[in-house]
Image (cartoon, helix red, strand yellow):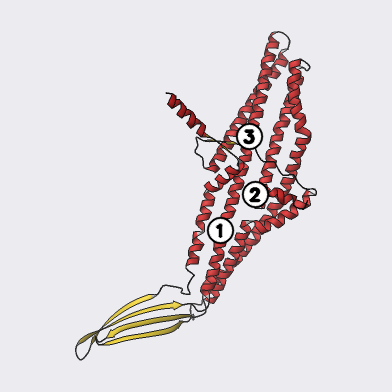
């Protein structure tokens, strides 16, 4: 029985997983289906690259022929073997190889972009869970205080010290506080489930967070400094921009290969045989495959169309990155300022009021209604700070992802030269 109890306790402990932000992010990237799909997609251009190592557009042709002849001595048979191969002499295979190599680079860059998105999703989910856990603790504390206040008011009402109106106000507030605490707990369960889904944990596991890192302080003149550095950095680091540039390069290489296909291919063949059962034959033949009727117009048109699409995609990605960085920078600057303002002006006063109302009530220095109003206002400010803090975390992670850097690296980037 003791062994069973110990084993059950061990299994219960295993169901709750406590991870840091970095550990959760790394696991989410490893377990991401999108990352796995992007890694698998690299095989296609690699296979194409493997088929462009030699200047031969197709497989060699091996033929055997047998001819029955009626001659003066009687029936004789001629036999012949031939091996022929078409060889590209216009450099088509070189252009295709470079195009395939560019597509490999594009696919590998898309793997990095998938990892960037997976890391961002994990960080956002982790921040949401960290905020939800703090909200649960604060809501539970507020509900417990409101319930203690409700019990006190009920006793005072029975003793004739409070009127019914005062007692009902306190009871209603206690019920509202407990309802808010229950909703906060449900939101925390949902946030934990969302993070657990990204991390690939089973449904019976619960994820818990550790302390979040500090949000970096901005340099002076942040609006212009952050935006200028962010734009330059994003255009040099974003993997989706690298992928679109490589895809454009690959399309241009394949378009060049399609045009070079109008150069005649060299046809080389060697043959041997036996004629009339007595004469042994051996010979070689050299020819050209001349594109007189089929002049690659369809392939050239398709390749040119692919170049136009790749160019348009590259421009669209570049514009999207610029808009993404501008928006993320603005959100981070405003969210960071709001969080600092709350810490410096609002949160300290709210925390003091929470402590002072409890002491004032215990010492009889404030009325029940005054305590209730002051406490509710202070707790509301604390809950609002959690929303502001969560937005600041998310804005920080969004800006780091827009620049394709780790959030810890963003600190050095924003403060460089400040």
Give the x, y percent position of residue 270: 37, 82
Task: Please state the horizontal and vertical placement of residue 389, each as a whole percent of the image.
Answer: 70, 38
Q: Residue 336 at x, y = what percent? A: 74, 42
Q: Nearer the viewer, mark 2 or mark 3?
A: 2
121 is higher (above) or lower (below) than 267: above
- Disc 2 residue crowd, few under 14, some 14–19, many 20+, Cα 10 Å: some
Residue bearing the label numbered 3: 132
Q: Nearer the viewer, residue 85 or 74?
A: 85
The residue pinned by badge 2 equals 406
Look at discs 3 and 1 and give the one toward the viewer: 1
- SS at badge 2: loop
Residue 413 circle label: none
Does residue 260 appear anywhere in the picture? yes
| In the image: residue 215, left or right of residue 262 | right
Instruction: State the residue at coordinates (71%, 35%).
Output: 385
In whole angstroms, how far apart are the C-alphas of marks 1 and 2? 19 Å
| Residue displayed at 72% across by 44% down | 216
Give the residue pinned by disc 1. Answer: 108
Image x and y of residue 53, in percent:
49, 70
In this rendering, the label closer to the viewer, 1 or 2 = 2
Q: CA distance from mark 3 to mark 1?
A: 36 Å
Q: How many marks?
A: 3
> For mark 3, does the 10 Å Cα neighbourhood hold few (<14), some (14 to 19), or many (20 or more) residues?
many
In the visual, does 352 lie left or right of 142?
Answer: right
In the rendered image, the residue lying farthest to the right is: 221
């Amino acid at each position: 029985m003791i062994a069973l109890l110990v084993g059950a306790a061990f299994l219960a402990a295993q169901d709750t997983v406590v991870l840091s932000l970095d550990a959760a992010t790394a696991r989410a990237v490893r377990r991401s289906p999108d990352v796995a799909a992007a890694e698998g997609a690299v095989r296609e251009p690699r296979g194409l690259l493997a088929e462009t190592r030699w200047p031969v557009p197709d497989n060699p042709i091996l033929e055997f022929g047998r001819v029955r002849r009626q001659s003066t001595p009687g029936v004789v048979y001629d036999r012949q073997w031939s091996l022929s191969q078409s060889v590209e002499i216009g450099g088509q295979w070189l252009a295709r190889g470079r195009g395939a190599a560019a597509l490999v680079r594009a696919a590998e860059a898309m793997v990095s972009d998938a990892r960037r998105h997976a890391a961002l999703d994990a960080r956002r989910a982790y921040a949401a869970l960290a905020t939800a856990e703090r909200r649960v603790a604060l809501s539970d504390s507020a509900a417990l205080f409101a319930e203690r206040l409700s019990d006190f008011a009920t006793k005072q009402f029975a003793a004739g010290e409070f009127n019914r109106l005062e007692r009902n106000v306190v009871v209603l507030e206690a019920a509202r506080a407990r309802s808010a605490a229950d909703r906060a707990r449900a939101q925390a369960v949902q946030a934990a489930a969302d993070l657990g889904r990204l991390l690939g944990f089973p449904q019976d596991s619960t994820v818990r967070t550790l302390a979040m890192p500090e949000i970096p302080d901005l340099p002076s003149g942040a609006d212009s400094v952050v935006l200028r550095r962010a734009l330059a950095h994003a255009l040099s680091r974003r993997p989706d921009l690298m992928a679109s540039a490589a895809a454009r390069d690959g399309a241009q290489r394949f378009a060049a290969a399609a045009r070079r296909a109008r150069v005649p291919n060299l046809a080389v063949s060697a043959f041997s045989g036996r004629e009339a059962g007595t004469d042994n034959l051996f010979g070689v033949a050299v020819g050209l495959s001349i594109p007189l009727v089929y002049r690659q117009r369809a392939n050239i048109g398709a390749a040119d169309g692919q170049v136009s699409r790749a160019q348009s995609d590259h421009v669209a990605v570049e514009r999207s990155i610029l808009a993404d960085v501008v928006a993320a920078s603005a959100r981070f600057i405003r969210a960071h300022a709001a969080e600092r303002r709350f810490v410096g002006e609002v949160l300290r006063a709210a925390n003091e009021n929470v402590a002072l109302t409890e002491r004032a009530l215990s010492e009889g220095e404030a009325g029940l209604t005054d305590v209730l109003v002051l406490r509710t206002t202070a707790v509301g400010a604390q809950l609002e700070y959690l929303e502001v803090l969560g937005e600041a975390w998310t804005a920080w992670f969004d800006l780091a992802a827009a620049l394709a850097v780790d959030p810890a690296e963003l600190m050095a980037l924003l403060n460089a030269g400040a």
